[in-house]
Image (tube, helix red, strand yellow):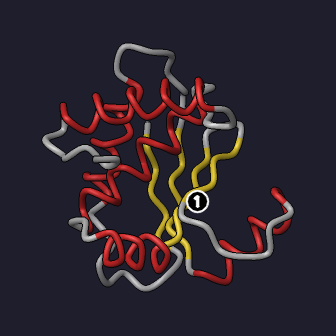
């Protein structure tokens, strides 16, 4: 079950059904979490969470928390989509897939793991009809 919490202005934020579809695609064929909560936050909450849990004093696009929680920062995702020339929905989908893969144990701390994670992200996004976020 995917629960979506919108804790910031809704402008440009996809519908909860989209978040659930993207998350379920990332879980397909792998282990399932009984529940996933996706919280869409503003810059201040993202910065606080990033500082508290990662020691980085700035907002970030997506944070994954053990137990099945994602925090996705709406203004950071919107800015990145603009700067990278991506469709906003494609970038939102990428952030959900990326966050879910972290919950499933994927990481990108070294080149080998990054290649593995990026390949999985690209495959899932292609199945959703989204472009390669790295290409």
Q: Crowding near pointer 1: few (<14 within 10 Å), some, many (20+)? A: many
The front one of 93 and 36 is 93
The front one of 114 and 16 is 114
The answer to which image quadrant residue 122 occupies is top left
Residue at the farthest left position: 129
Q: Picture coordinates of residue 123 (x, y %)?
A: 28, 28
Q: Height in image: 38 above or below 116? A: below
Q: Picture coordinates of residue 20 (x, y %)?
A: 33, 45
Which residue is label 1 attached to? 71
Q: Which residue is located at x 43 percent, y 34 percent?
A: 118
Q: Is residue 20 left or right of residue 30?
A: left
The answer to which image quadrant residue 104 occupies is top right
Q: Which residue is located at x 41 percent, y 79 percent?
A: 79
Q: Is residue 65 left or right of residue 68?
A: right
Q: Is residue 58 left or right of residue 130?
A: right
Q: Is residue 48 left or right of residue 124?
A: right
Q: How many marks?
A: 1
Q: Which residue is located at x 69 percent, y 37 percent?
A: 109
Q: Height in image: 84 above or below 120? A: below
Q: Which residue is located at x 59 percent, y 36 percent?
A: 102
Label 1, secondary structure: give it. strand
Q: Picture coordinates of residue 27 (x, y %)?
A: 41, 26
Quarter of the image with the N terminus is top left
Q: Picture coordinates of residue 40 (x, y %)?
A: 50, 67
């Amino acid at each position: 079950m995917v629960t979506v919490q919108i804790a910031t202005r809704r402008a440009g934020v996809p519908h909860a059904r989209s978040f659930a579809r993207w998350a379920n695609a990332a879980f397909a064929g792998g282990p399932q979490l009984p529940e996933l909560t996706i919280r869409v936050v503003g810059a201040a909450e993202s910065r606080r969470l990033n500082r508290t849990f990662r020691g980085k004093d700035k907002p970030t696009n997506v944070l994954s928390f053990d137990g099945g929680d994602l925090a996705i920062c709406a203004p950071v995702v919107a800015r990145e989509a603009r700067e990278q020339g991506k469709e906003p929905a494609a970038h939102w989908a990428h952030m959900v897939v990326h966050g879910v893969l972290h919950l499933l144990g994927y990481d990108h701390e070294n080149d080998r793991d990054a290649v593995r994670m990026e390949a999985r992200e690209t495959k899932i996004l292609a199945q959703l009809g989204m472009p390669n976020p790295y290409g």
